[in-house]
Image (cartoon, rainbow, N blue to C red):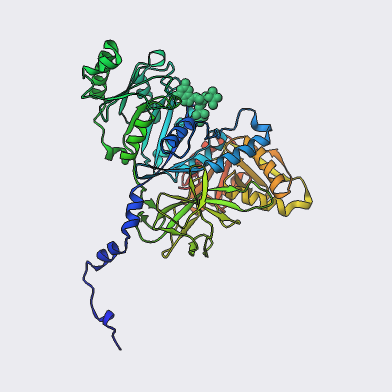
Amino acid sequence: MRVTPQQGRRKPWYFGIFAGLMSQNPKSHAEIARRRTFGIISHPDAGKTTLTEKLLLYGGAIQEAGAVKSNKVKKGATSDFMEIERQRGISVATSVMGFEYKNRKINILDTPGHQDFAEDTYRTLTAVDSAIVVIDVAKGVEAQTKKLVEVCRMRNTPIIVFINKLDREGRDAYDLLDEIEQDLGLKVCPLSWPLGMGVDFKGVYNLYTNNLRMYEEHHKQKRTPSYAVESPTDPQIAEYAGEEAAQELAQEVELVQGVYPAFDPEAYRRGEVSPVFFGSALHNFGVEELLECFVTIAPAPRPKMAEEREVTPQEDRFSGFVFKIHANMDPKHRDRLAFVKVVSGKFQRNTNYLHTRLGKKLKFSNPTAFMASKKEVVEEAFPGDIVGLHDTGNFRIGDTLCEGEKLHYKGIPSFSPEHFRFINNADPMKAKQLNKGIDQLMDEGVAQLFTLAQNQRKIIGTVGALQYEVIQYRLEHEYGAKCSYEPYNAYKACWIESQDDEQLAEFSRLKQRYLAYDKQGRLVFLADSSFSLQMAQEKFDQLTFHFKSEF
Ligand code: G4P
């Protein structure tokens, strides 16, 4: 056999490592290191939209206040479909807001405020590398805050807390921190401390940089005066804030520093401790401190688990996953926009990538990037970036796109719906359109579809009642199909995992009426009450009842 010079030379053991390092492009490394992709989460009305807008103002991404429209579905919107369409228009424009700040490329991923769209928010949180939680100083921890933080904690997503509306009377700062620790399960570390509150609000002391910023209400858009001081006991503080406020601050900071450990940025990046800032987003106060600290401590894109292995951003080959699908607003063009988070390598325009689930190669001639509320075609994108891919029905939430090695990113979980209804075809001539419409809306993640094992009837499960009207409206306007609903009594949907075939067979026989398949063909138990669920769990101890679709 002829041996080529290449084959003949044995490679030393360290060749693989060396080759790996060589193959990583230094430009890509620098691009990855400067990306910060995060989401702002809050209970509706805590100030998420206002804070987003102020951050964009700092980044120069918008020029005036009021440019970011609230993506809230206003109260009473359930019967106002223009409002829903308006909302969809806003939400595609503000889905991703990218801007540059101090040589950082910052991507804010927007999350819907309305709790009926909570699933959408959960999915978006799978694409962030960190999160900022906004809490209203008067209301403290609210229901939606709890759910969203829980989702972040499942993934150890690093969280910064921003306590907002300090210009109003609110709760005591210590009580709030206690509540955050207890109700959200976060270990906190205050990095700023307020001087007074409401009418007595004087400013915030930045514990991270030893800096005092004085509050002046009329400085809504401008920067308020800021003073570098030596420490919280610096006599200069009394000159700026008055004797009484200075004394109070010194005492409080001493207490804070005694109670809370010194801030450890590494512990924050591991999701173990959450720095806390105080301010007033409306008055643009405390926002700059938040942003400055964020760009210093927030994590760059993080590795992600695929079924096969963990994938790091610095790897050479491109991979990414779909976390959101947005349907076109124009019913005549039924293409959709799939939002892909780049996990590794470099995404390039007009390059073939493997769609793992379909096993086919796709290339994209018009990938879109999002800068502020503008969309533009991009040639390349790096880990941490989000690209919008025009899609004619190939994508489903959770799909993986990759290059070279076949990867499957761990799916994006669906949670058990809260509401269930049968869906019926109300126009027999349009059965095909109805099925296609349901199929595509489910791929978009608008709701979940279950097919009863016994008779193949279709059940739609949703998080909120609003989705039923959205589905009905969109089926009619985008697919020309009509549907009606009928009540279906279910308490929870549980995905069934079995360690024992015999027990599964027995369970299937007894509970046949309550069994269904989800869109991926997985077995689901639609328990009709908490009692029957509990009984089933006790009786069938070799089965596991999961409340989310990934386990
Ligand atoms: P969200 O996205 O979290 O739902 O909240 P959003 O920013 O829309 O803020 C909710 C309300 O709280 C808004 O008032 C907003 O102006 C107000 N707000 C936000 N930050 C602050 C703050 O720091 N201080 C005070 N005092 N108010 C704040 P609104 O009356 O509902 O709306 P708008 O008419 O002012 O737009």
Q: Nearer the viewer, residue 25 or 314?
A: 25
Residue drawn 35% across and 56% down?
A: 28
Q: Position of residue 326 (x, y in %)?
A: 57, 47
Q: Position of residue 261 (x, y in %)?
A: 24, 29
Number of callouts: 0
Q: Which of 247 and 442 is in front in this view?
A: 247
Q: Quadrant of the N terminus?
A: bottom left
Q: Is residue 454 visible?
A: no
Q: Position of residue 255 (x, y in %)?
A: 25, 20
Task: Farthest residue to the bottom: give it.
Answer: 1
Task: Farthest residue to the top: give it.
Answer: 244
Q: Work out whether 463 lies above or below 307.
A: above
Is 309 on the left or on the right of 470, as rendered?
left
Is 44 on the left or on the right of 30, as rendered?
right
Residue drawn 21% across and 71% down?
A: 12
Q: Which of 313 and 93 is in front in this view?
A: 93
Residue drawn 54% across and 57% down?
A: 366
Tell me where residue 195 sits by quadrant: top left
Q: Work out whether 425 lies above or below 294.
A: below
Q: Position of residue 109 (x, y in %)?
A: 47, 42
Q: Is residue 124 visible?
A: yes
Q: Work out whether 23 lies above or below 270.
A: below
Tell me where residue 37 sits by quadrant: top left
